[in-house]
Amino acid sequence: PSTSLTPKFCLSIQASWDLDCIRPEMGYTCNIALPSTPYARVSFATTTGSSSAKGRRKERDHKSFCYMLKDLSSECFLPIGAGGGLHSLDNAKMLFDSGADKLILNTSVYENPKLIEDLYGIYGQQAIIASVDVKETKSGVYNVYTHNGTKKACSIEVYQERITKNKCIGELYLNSMERDGTGHGYDINMLKSFTNLNEKLPIILAGGAGKTSHIIEALLIDGLDACATAH
């Protein structure tokens, strides 16, 4: 679709900062190795740390995150998708003002369609990426999760039905929560269960890439437009 800036053979580089550990006032260096190719872009999102042994999450620090995003965008000439705790138009403006080219949203896509409509009205469809966190049950059913993967939203089929009706979304970022960070390869069955239903939006697959062959295997599947990796 003309709404996508992602070519078929695209590498999306994932970068995240734990804002519990890195503060701009302490000084830091942005050391991301960026390939010199037009077929790559950066996905940049906040992560949240634990404030106690019970694992209660702290609020994201958008000001610090935008400070680091500005530093990244000043040295990076690849398109940057930014997100993490994006719940308002003010959050979105801060990200764009700090150098983001696209917005990555998860929970708001499912729970706050009005915000998505407002973002679409201001920035356009091409600027909105729906991040989809997916987990497989023991019985082989794939469910979509929100709130940093802590809250089950619905089945992958129900989610896709809602997305298909949403004219504001430009791309889908499909992530396997169980494969993420393992390097054991993408969840191809998860991808196929999604692409079998999808004929509308470009899909970026994430979670599990550990070597080049994993990316090649995924890109050979019809319906996939790009792969993402943090490795």
Image (tube, rainbow, N blue to C red):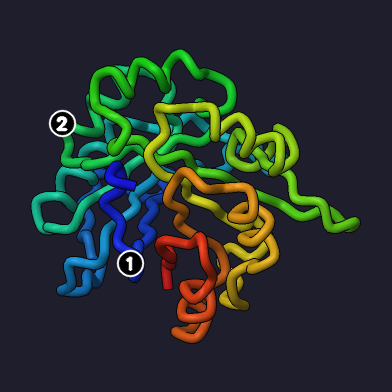
Residue 15 found in image quarter: bottom left
The residue at 58%/40% (across/down) is 148
Amino acid bearing label 1? Cys
Q: Secondary structure at mark 2?
A: helix
The residue at 24%/48% (across/down) is 26
Q: Quadrant of the C terminus?
A: bottom left
Query: On the image, numbered disc 1 is attached to which residue?
Result: 10
The answer to whether residue 225 is left or right of residue 163 is left
Most foreground residue, 76 or 3: 3
Which mark identifies residue 97?
Answer: 2
Q: Secondary structure at mark 1?
A: loop
Amino acid bearing label 2? Asp
The vertical placement of 94 against 215, above or below, is above
How many residues crowd around disc 1 within 10 Å: few (fewer than 14), some, or many (20 or more)? many
Q: Position of residue 3 (x, y in %)?
A: 30, 42
In the displayed image of the protein, which residue is found farthest to the left?
A: 74
**Residue 25 in sight:** no
Q: Position of residue 135 (x, y in %)?
A: 71, 52
